[in-house]
């Protein structure tokens, strides 16, 4: 079990910056910390050997150990000031529950200590309660449970004079033979002095101030008014057909959809904020298919989808802060935390960019942090039952994966679904990401190095070190923030092994750089999904997997445009910017059993490609490796001139005859015949490509996740590493193509 977990508020720093580290440590009195440079994170005994270098710097410590909790669940909150209401009040909202009957769930909660709660009971029935501390001193509950994924108006009324609570649930969507609109009333035991200090949506306060009773599903147009207007008037108001008076609050969840705030259109302006990123820009009651863009008709997207397992910011306190040395070389580093008994450790990984006025190295490595975030804390090996079938082998589980199974509160990846079955739209690094560490193994065992994402990328870092190639590091977030400026001045830009997730600003940066710069794409399934970053919420990405692509969920009809930017989500290929246009190749298949070698093509003899194969006589390239025993594997890319591979591109080598575990991508599979597997389809191949661009630029692509692990085979003494070095050295030369 992991007894230490931690994170920092940033993933990219410069020399001289201060790094804050937030730690939760259990089963120990103290822990120590040291700054390490991560060079080779793979612990495979057949690999080149694990390597980290200690960086002498004053961090302090030992530090006192303490546990810090993570509390999941999204909710909204408004805090009225000086509000007091006399007489009867009505509380109402539109709801679309996804897990009615799973637990007690609050929809609108007025008051922290004493007040009213409108929601669903343990059987999924609408309920209106009077609360005093931890006691329910009155309750009215309907007789019929709500159905899942159907719209209702739920209405609660409280009359302090009669001390009566009344609740109704009115089905907005009617089905033949089903009656689920009904009302109930009850008498409270005592009068209630309502605490108007706060109003919560999708949750309530429990004893000790904790938030609890999280709601799963959509909420739209909650409001509070004086009096008892009746169901007909309430529903007309909820649908926007007429306005009730006198209103106390009338919350508009269609306000400021791109961010985390919402407005009150009532007379008091009781505006509020959402926490833990519930889904916004999702279809509401009014959505009728007339638009798919929430910006065009925000009222059609006035709903918010809450989940009891949403997580944005763990909110931990900082345990220690240290300053990076002013002369620190750019690279990948970590704050290495160790328990006082030496039995537990944790690495808080981050990049250090070159100092602002320092000489730039010949090579720039772009650390694919967006993809790290997409896979952050994923549980695919255990939670996805077909993983072993898809991999063609047994999985293996290390302590990090076991920890995630035991600690669901550490949040979900973009590959999972929420407890109500809806897809996960957001992934944040403001929490411990336990698989973003050296020494972490993947799920696929037996045939390879069993590494994925970060540790697979350290094979590239180790190659640079082995060959004595000077390099700097930036992250995807740096590209998002700085655009092409982050790449400017570097002769060669090298990608990671799996840069799958890309924002518009990131892709534009590569496009602008490529006209005169040189790009080496040393991965597979890169630049596949379009993502969005937020201008106001740091450390989080959004991905809506619309319409096609390899995906474990879809966002729901009408929910295809990102909340943060309003851009259409999905595959870059579907948006008219297939990766072939910039990198020559794009995703074609995946398989996780055996990797294959490349075989030279006739184009390998073209004089333009002579530098690639200098000193290499072999026709077969990469019939070895630490990932499936070959250089072309896991996820592979092909050239396709119809999709935008430049007409001057040379396909200098291609893999052949992958196993039938390798399957074609859904976007290519137009007709599901038996000809779409690795031994049957010639589209299932990895193409090594090279082409020149305007102003002396060039692009070299391998189109394989397994390439880096093949470079690392035999301590980097192999033809794949030699070929890669040939390209790096030619690309870093000032000689134009």
Image: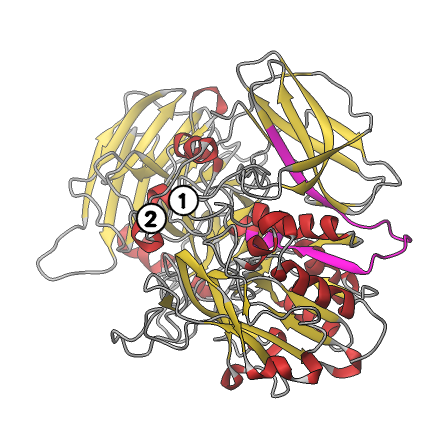
**Span highlighted in magenta in the image:** 346-371
Report the side of 625 relative to 201 (left or right).
right
Examine the rendered structure and indicate whether residue 153 appears above or below residue 185.
Answer: below
Q: Relative to the observer, which residue lies in front, 325 or 49?
A: 49
| Residue furthest top in the image | 29
Q: Residue 523 placed where, x, y %?
A: 57, 61
* Closer to us: 265 or 260: 260
Q: Is residue 208 a member of the stretch shown in magenta?
A: no
| SS state under label 1 | loop
Residue 210 screen position, x and y as percent: 47, 26
Q: Quadrant of the C terminus?
A: bottom right
Q: Looking at the image, tell me whether mark 1 or mark 2 is earlier in sequence order.
A: 2
Secondary element under disc 2, as helix, strand or loop, is: loop
Residue depicted at 58% across the width and 69% down the height? 618
- Front one among 302 and 317: 317
In the image, 726 versus 4, the foreground residue is 726
Residue under label 1:
446
């Amino acid at each position: 079990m992991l007894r230490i977990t931690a994170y920092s508020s940033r993933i990219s720093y410069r020399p001289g910056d201060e790094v804050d580290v937030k730690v939760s440590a259990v089963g120990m009195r103290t822990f120590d910390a040291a700054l390490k440079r991560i060079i080779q994170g793979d612990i495979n005994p057949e690999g080149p050997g694990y390597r980290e270098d200690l960086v002498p710097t004053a961090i302090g410590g030992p530090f006192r150990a303490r546990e810090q909790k993570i509390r999941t669940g999204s909710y909204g909150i408004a805090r009225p000031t000086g509000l007091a209401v006399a007489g009867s009040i009505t509380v109402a909202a539109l709801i679309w529950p996804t897990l009615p009957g799973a637990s007690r769930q609050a929809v609108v909660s007025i008051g922290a200590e004493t007040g009213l709660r409108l929601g669903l009971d343990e059987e999924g029935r609408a309920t209106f309660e009077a609360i005093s501390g931890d006691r329910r001193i009155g309750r009215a509950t309907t007789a019929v449970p709500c159905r899942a994924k159907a719209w209702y108006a739920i209405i609660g009324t409280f009359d302090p004079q009669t001390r009566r609570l009344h609740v109704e649930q009115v089905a907005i969507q009617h089905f033949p033979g089903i009656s689920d609109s009904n009302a109930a009333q009850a008498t409270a035991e005592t009068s209630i002095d309502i605490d108007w200090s706060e109003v919560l949506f999708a949750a309530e306060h429990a004893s000790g101030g904790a938030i609890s009773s999280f709601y799963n599903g959509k909420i739209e147009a909650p409001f509070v008014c004086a009096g008892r207007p009746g169901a007909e008037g309430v529903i007309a108001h909820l649908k926007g057909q007429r306005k009730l008076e006198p209103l106390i609050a009338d919350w508009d969840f269609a306000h400021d959809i791109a961010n985390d705030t919402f407005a009150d259109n009532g007379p008091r302006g009781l505006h509020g904020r959402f926490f833990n990123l519930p889904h916004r820009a999702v279809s509401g009651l009014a959505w009728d298919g007339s638009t798919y863009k929430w910006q065009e008709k925000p009222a059609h997207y006035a709903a918010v989808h809450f989940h009891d397992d949403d997580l944005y910011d763990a909110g931990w306190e900082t345990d220690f802060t240290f300053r990076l040395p002013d002369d620190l070389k750019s690279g990948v580093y970590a704050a290495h935390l160790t328990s006082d008994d030496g039995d537990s450790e944790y690495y808080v990984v981050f990049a250090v960019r070159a100092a602002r006025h320092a000489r730039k190295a010949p090579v720039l490595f772009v650390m694919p942090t967006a993809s790290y975030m997409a896979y952050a804390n994923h549980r695919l090996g255990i939670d996805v039952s077909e993983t072993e079938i898809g991999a063609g082998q047994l999985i293996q589980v290390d302590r990090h994966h076991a920890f995630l199974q035991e600690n669901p509160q550490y949040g979900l990846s973009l590959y999972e679904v929420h407890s109500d079955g809806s897809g996960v739209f957001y992934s944040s690094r403001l929490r411990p990401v336990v698989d973003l560490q050296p020494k972490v193994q993947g799920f696929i065992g037996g045939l390879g190095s069993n590494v994925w994402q970060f540790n697979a990328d350290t094979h590239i870092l180790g190659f640079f070190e082995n060959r004595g190639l000077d390099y700097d590091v930036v992250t995807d977030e740096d590209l998002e923030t700085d655009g092409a400026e982050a790449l400017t001045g570097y002769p060669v830009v090298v990608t990671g092994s799996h840069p799958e997730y890309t924002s518009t600003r990131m892709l534009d940066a590569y496009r602008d750089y490529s006209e005169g710069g040189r790009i080496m794409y040393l991965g597979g399934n890169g630049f596949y999904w379009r993502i969005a970053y937020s201008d106001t919420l740091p450390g989080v990405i959004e991905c809506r997997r619309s319409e096609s692509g390899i995906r474990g969920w879809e966002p729901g009809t009408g929910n295809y445009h990102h909340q943060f930017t309003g851009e259409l989500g999905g595959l870059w290929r579907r948006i008219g910017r297939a990766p072939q246009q910039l990198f020559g190749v794009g995703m074609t298949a995946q398989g996780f059993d055996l990797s294959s070698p490349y075989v030279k093509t006739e184009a390998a003899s073209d004089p333009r490609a002579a530098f690639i194969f200098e000193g290499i006589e072999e026709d077969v390239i990469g019939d070895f490796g630490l990932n499936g025993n070959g250089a072309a594997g896991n996820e592979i890319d092909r050239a396709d001139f119809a999709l935008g591979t430049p007409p001057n591109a040379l396909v200098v080598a291609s893999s052949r005859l992958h196993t039938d575990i390798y399957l074609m991508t859904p976007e290519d599979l137009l007709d599901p015949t038996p000809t779409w597997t690795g031994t049957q389809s010639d589209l299932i191949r990895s193409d090594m490509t090279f082409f020149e661009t305007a102003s002396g630029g060039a692009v070299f692509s391998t189109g394989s996740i397994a390439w880096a692990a093949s470079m690392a085979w035999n301590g980097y003494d192999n033809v794949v590493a030699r070929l890669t070095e040939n390209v790096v050295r030619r690309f870093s030369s000032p000689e134009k193509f």
